[in-house]
Image: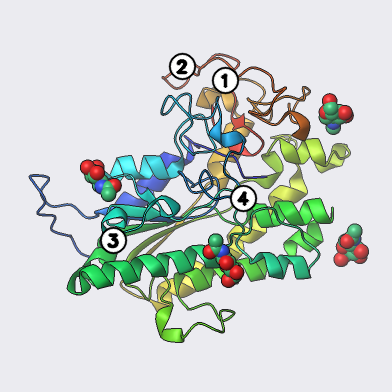
Amino acid sequence: MALFPASLPAAVPLLLILLVAAEPPAAYADTDGDRGMKWYSRVFAFGNSLTDTGNAAVFPVTAGGPFTMPPYGETYFGHPSGRASNGRLIVDFLVEGLKVPQPTPYLTGRTAADFLNGTNFAVGGATALDPAFLASKGIVTFVPISLSNETSWFENVVQLIKSSDYDQHRKIMASSVFYVGEISVNDYFFALMSNNSVNVAASLVPHIIGAIRSALTLRRPWIQSTPSSSISAMIAAGARTVAVSGMLPIGCEPQQPALFPGGPGDYDPATGCIARFNDLAELHNLALNKMLSELRLAHPGRTLIYADIYRPVVSAVASPASYGFGDTPLAACCGGGGGPYNFNFSTFCATPGRLPAPTRPSSSRGTGSTSRRLQTGSSHATC
Ligand SMILES: *[C@@H]1O[C@H](CO)[C@@H](O)[C@H](O)[C@H]1NC(C)=O
Ligand SMILES: *[C@@H]1O[C@H](CO)[C@@H](O)[C@H](O)[C@H]1NC(C)=O
Ligand SMILES: *[C@@H]1O[C@H](CO)[C@@H](O)[C@H](O)[C@H]1NC(C)=O
Ligand SMILES: *[C@@H]1O[C@H](CO)[C@@H](O)[C@H](O)[C@H]1NC(C)=O
């Protein structure tokens, strides 16, 4: 499951290019020190383990999980950092590219001052849909956090900022980048684990896209007990620049071919990934793009960016050498299990019995040793 993912080096430049290419809503005058004029001052991030920089590490259900132990964090930042990666996540590259501070993981902050550097609401293991809804479809989840929780937390932060500086809060939202990291790979994965039918997983797509749309625009209709005025989703709160990540190629995660072995016709010849799971990801990405197009029409003046993490990963899996990876891109680089995917839940990365971590990747791309692999843990591309 995507409790534990990573840096997608190939995807990051693309996202940054998209952000730079996007017309900034209005240049934001940052008068703090001599940094001069800059467009953005902070990042608010949402998502699951691909984006979490410290929430799951303190959330009671997941605290002390494998990602809090070595070798997670060994490349960055030299120790486990709450990230489900040996290194940096997409959001870290985003923050570095924008030259803004690291956002505070929501569960580690308390005051408006804590959150004014930006806030990361992502939680490893989170789902797009509420666990109760998934349970009603017979789908079992492990971490009781969904996008609606993250949106409520965002609302708490908005209220804190309003109460400390009401006049500035719109300006604060306008000068922030909202990054909605990949969310819902866990929904699909739990659906596949609960009922090995890609149709059941695919039936979630419209619900998931609806949940992402609500997080961007509307108060969530299913929070009936909450007065409508108190829930303002991102755009309602004044977000002007929002980047929404698409789905990764689910069929290329080592756990998928390891857990759902198929016949020869089930694998994509170019990548070796399970074709029907990648088709599910493409279905999701089409629906997400359609929804974003509708929102662009409905909200002129906002910049809504689709961040593609699908094609870069597929390219890296199809031609690992051109990205500096070894020749087993579908094998998890941490944990054990052997075989082409090196995945087995009983030897998950950083659990006792796991195999030693791989040699450190070379810092320059294209010269990685053959042990350099794309996948860490189970679904977290890195190394
Ligand atoms: C905010 O970011 C600045 C610059 O990186 C840092 O010095 C400061 O400690 C941060 N504040 C909080 C509350 O994290
Ligand atoms: C997440 O949302 C559910 C449903 O609204 C709520 O019952 C639960 O307390 C929330 N969890 C957290 C940690 O905020
Ligand atoms: C899986 O889904 C199919 C189609 O909806 C259904 O017929 C079947 O009973 C489900 N199986 C389980 C184990 O839930
Ligand atoms: C995973 O490891 C366990 C314990 O070594 C073993 O019994 C099981 O067969 C392995 N599963 C697979 C799919 O290799």
Helix, strand or loop at label 2? It is: loop
Residue 21 visible from this viewpoint: no
- In whole angstroms, how far apart are the C-alphas of marks 1 and 2? 8 Å
Tag nearer the camera, 2 or 3: 3
Do callouts 1 and 2 mark residues in contact (Cβ within 8 Å)? yes
Q: Residue at x 48, y 41 (%)?
A: 11
Do callouts 1 and 3 mark residues in contact (Cβ within 8 Å)? no
Q: Amino acid at mark 1?
A: Arg
Task: Please rate how many residues cluster around mark 3, counting C-alpha atoms within 10 Å: few if below 14, some from 14 to 19, many from 20.
Answer: some
- Front one among 268 and 61: 61
The circle drawn on residue 362 is 2
Do callouts 2 and 4 mark residues in contact (Cβ within 8 Å)? no
Instruction: Note whether 253 is above or below 75 in the view shown.
Output: below
Q: Amino acid at mark 4?
A: Val
Instruction: Note whether 24 is above or below 323 in the view shown.
Output: below
N-terminal-most mark, 3 or 4: 4
Q: Which image quarter holds the N terminus?
A: top right
Helix, strand or loop at label 1? It is: loop
Tag nearer the camera, 2 or 4: 4
Across and down, in percent, residue 16 comes to 36, 45
From the image, tell me which residue sits under label 3: 112
Q: Which image quarter holds the C terminus?
A: top right
- In whole angstroms, how far apart are the C-alphas of marks 2 and 4? 35 Å
From the image, tell me which residue sits under label 4: 61
From the image, tell me which residue sits under label 1: 372
